[in-house]
Image (cartoon, rainbow, N blue to C red):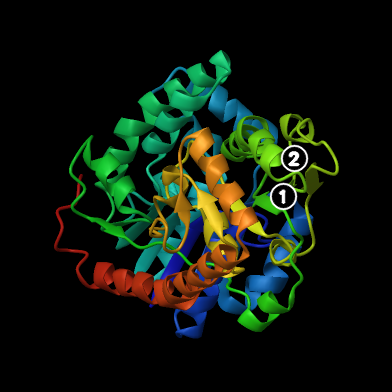
């Protein structure tokens, strides 16, 4: 297949989950013999050079557009007077739209793939088969933010964006031949607004470390780990909730317990949680898996969000016993009390963590089950094979669904 890939962020370096997903997908498709072109935004010339160096061998062409932050903010401000979601307006660019149209005019593509709804506007009207990698229902994500945000201004902002996103994502999905989401719950949320017969469920994978390296690591007694990009509001809330409402009870029961908050760009609210040696905020680490392999228990106390929580698979892939919330497990589908423990209230969450810290045999049982689950269901190749099948089907059947004018 000849595929044009549209990405809002350069898929190298892979600092965020969406960048990693696009990068891994491109490597898989190139290994299958597909011919790839990429159009994406870059932050600066340095990132542009790194992108071309690392992913240039996979592509026939790479077109990049630098997106000045002031321009993104200006487009977002203008969108305040319209019905367009602010996250879509933030990534608006006439230059990138011209690059896409020029590539399609000259490329003879079998398929165009747009990653996330923020890139949908660049593809929705193209006269070629199209797949939207929506990933998650942004309406569901924002709804949960509204329900859990403590700051009234944040709550108001999320509410405004939810009211814009909900009709928009249902409308834009109708302009694509297939819409890929990572979980059934996300499909159900979209269907609350309008039918989405073209929606398919196909999550993405994660890197699973070799079992021998996982078991060679030395676990620190009482160490509880949570990780992710600590500039993300959902992660800030999760870390804060565990540190303030759950960990004190854990520490009273298990005095040697410590809580590690691991991840790049920790916000001030996260830094303020630090109480070394009991609560440690590491910032970015060279090897996330290496840190995970030194912990005894992982937690994913996510109270808002949607789609797939990559960190949960990363925890399980390091043979860590995990205590998580229903929302965090929603896109992963681990079985409660078999591959992980699902608890939503602070007392139940704390009791589950305490039980694991006190019981080495239960930690070992749950950790082994977690690794087997991650290895069986969450490798990149198995899930990208399914995604490529969706691409082939969309390319072959593109004329079957009615197209909107």
**Residue depicted at 44% across the width and 80% down the height:** 34
Residue sticking out furthest to the top: 152
Pointer 2 with pointer 1, Cβ within 8 A? yes
Badge 1: residue crowd in 10 Å (few <14, some 14–19, many ≥20)? some
Report helix, strand or loop for mark 1.
loop
Measure the C-alpha gap from mark 2 to mark 1: 7 Å
Between 400 and 380, which is closer to the camera in this rendering? 380
Q: Residues within 10 Å of mark 2 (few under 14, many from 20)?
A: many
Q: Quadrant of the C terminus?
A: top left
Residue 192 location, x and y as percent? Answer: 22, 36
Rendered position, 20 above or below 245: below
Residue 166's label in the rendered image is none
Q: Is residue 131 left or right of 238 when viewed as pictured?
A: left
Whether 321 is drawn above or below 317: the answer is above
In x, y percent, where is residue 328?
Answer: 47, 47
**Residue where numbered disc 2 is placed:** 266
Residue 350 rendering spot, x and y as whole percentages: 57, 41
Q: Residue 46: which quarter of the image? A: bottom right
- Residue 293 left/right relative to 235: right
Query: In this view of the protein, which residue sits in the foreground, 30 or 152?
Result: 152
Q: Is residue 64 visible?
A: no
Q: Which residue is mark 1?
A: 263
Q: Position of residue 68 (x, y in %)?
A: 69, 39
Q: Which residue lies at the image location 51% right of the left edge and 65% below the top edge? A: 366
Above or below for 295 versus 87: below
* Badge 2 element: loop
Q: Nearer the viewer, residue 51 or 283?
A: 283
On screen, residue 258 versus residue 65, left or right, reads right
């Amino acid at each position: 297949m000849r595929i044009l890939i549209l990405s809002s962020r350069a898929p190298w370096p892979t600092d965020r989950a969406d960048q990693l997903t696009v990068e891994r997908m491109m490597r898989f498709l190139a290994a299958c013999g597909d011919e790839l072109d990429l159009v994406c935004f870059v932050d600066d010339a340095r990132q542009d050079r790194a992108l071309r160096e690392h992913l240039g061998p996979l592509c026939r062409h790479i077109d990049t557009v630098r997106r000045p932050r002031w321009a993104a903010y200006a487009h977002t401000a203008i969108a305040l007077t319209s019905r367009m979601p602010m996250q879509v307006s933030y990534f608006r660019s006439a230059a990138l739209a011209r690059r896409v149209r020029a590539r399609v005019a000259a490329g003879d593509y079998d398929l165009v793939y747009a990653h996330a709804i923020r890139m949908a506007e660049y593809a929705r009207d193209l006269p070629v088969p199209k797949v939207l990698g929506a990933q998650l229902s942004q309406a569901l994500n924002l709804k949960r933010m509204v329900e859990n945000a403590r700051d009234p201004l944040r709550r108001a902002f999320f509410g405004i964006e939810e009211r814009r996103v909900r009709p928009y994502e249902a409308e834009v999905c109708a302009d694509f031949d297939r819409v890929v989401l990572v979980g059934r719950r996300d499909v159900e949320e979209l269907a609350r607004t309008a039918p989405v017969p073209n929606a398919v469920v196909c999550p993405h994978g994660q890197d699973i470390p070799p079992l021998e390296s996982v078991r060679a690591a030395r676990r620190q007694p009482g160490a509880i780990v949570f990780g992710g990009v600590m500039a993300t509001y959902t992660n800030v809330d999760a870390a804060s909730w565990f540190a303030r409402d759950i960990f004190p009870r854990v520490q009273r029961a298990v005095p040697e317990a410590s809580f590690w908050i691991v991840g790049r760009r920790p916000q001030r609210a996260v830094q303020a949680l630090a109480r070394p040696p009991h609560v440690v905020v590491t910032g970015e680490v060279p090897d996330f898996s290496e840190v995970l392999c030194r912990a005894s228990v992982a937690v994913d106390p996510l109270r808002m969000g949607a789609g797939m929580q990559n960190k949960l698979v990363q925890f399980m892939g390091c043979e860590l016993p995990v205590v998580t919330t229903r929302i965090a497990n929603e896109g992963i589908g681990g079985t409660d009390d078999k591959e992980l423990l699902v608890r939503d209230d602070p007392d139940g969450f704390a009791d589950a963590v305490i039980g694991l810290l006190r019981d080495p045999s239960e930690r070992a049982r749950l950790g082994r089950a977690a690794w087997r689950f991650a290895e069986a269901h969450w490798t990149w190749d198995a899930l990208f094979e399914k995604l490529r099948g969706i691409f082939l089907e969309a390319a072959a059947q593109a004329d079957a669904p009615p197209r909107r004018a």
